[in-house]
Image (spheres, grey):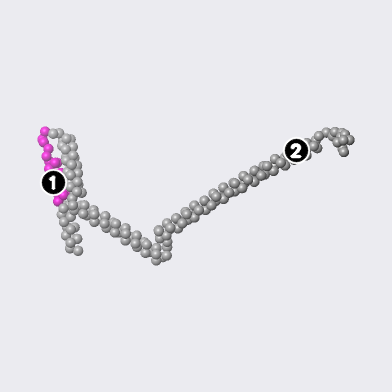
Amino acid sequence: MSDNFEKTAEQAAAFQKIWMESMSKIMQTAFAFGSDSPPPDVLKQIRSGIFQALAQSWEEFMRSPQFTESMKQWMDAAINFRKMSNDFMAKVRNEIQAPSREDIDTVMLTVRHMEKRLLDRVEDLAVRIAQIDSRLNGHAAQAAVTKTTVNRNKTSKARKPATRKTKAEAA
């Protein structure tokens, strides 16, 4: 416990040191102007000096070992929290007998496989029906041609004018 407190105190001291340095640089820049420059230029110099000092101090702070270590600790804590919350939610789902994410994914995958197999079978049946239909249409078309020819022959005989048959034709 005391190690964590000492680490935190060291980090706070390092942070305070960086801020004190940046504030001193800001103050030096603010009052380091000549008497011959007009006031608007002085304000621009103050502003640029402040921004430069802030940028430099923040860069030093973010590159400091203390900052990188604290960010590493924060990321580790966030990862551990995520793992703990996932484990907790898995236990809750297990206790209330609710399906887990893996269970749902497995069911969805199984349904997709069944759907694909059913669609493949339906496509095979559609091909077979089309083949049977074409065979039947081929036979039906041939039968229709034959039937039409027979009907035409019957109709054409009925339409022919009656001619006298000779005795030889009648016998």
Task: Look at discs 2 and 1 and give the one toward the viewer.
Answer: 2
Q: Which residue is mark 1?
A: 24
Residue segment shown in magenta:
17-36
User: Is 152 situated above or below 20?
Assistant: above
**Residue 152, label in figure:** 2
Left or right of residue 102, residue 142 in this image: right
Residue type marked 1: Ser
**In this view of the protein, which residue sits in the foreground, 155 or 71?**
155
User: Is 49 situated above or below 95?
Assistant: above
Residue 19 magenta-drawn?
A: yes
Which of the image's four quarters has the N terminus? bottom left
Residue displayed at 14% across by 41% down:
30
Residue displayed at 18% across by 52% down:
65
Query: How packed is label 2: few (under 14 Cα within 10 Å), some, or many (20 or more)?
Result: few
Which of the image's four quarters has the C terminus? top right
**Residue 5, label in figure:** none
**In this view of the protein, which residue sits in the foreground, 10 or 116?**
116
Q: Helix, strand, or loop for circle 2?
A: helix
Mark 2 or mark 1: which comes first in sequence?
1
Query: How packed is label 1: few (under 14 Cα within 10 Å), some, or many (20 or more)?
Result: few
Residue type marked 2: Arg
Left or right of residue 147, residue 15 in this image: left
Left or right of residue 146, residue 158 in this image: right
Gap between marks 2 and 1, in whole Å? 117 Å
Extreme residue toward the right, this view:
167
What is the x, y in percent for residue 42? 15, 37
Residue 159 magenta-drawn?
A: no
Q: Helix, strand, or loop for circle 1?
A: helix
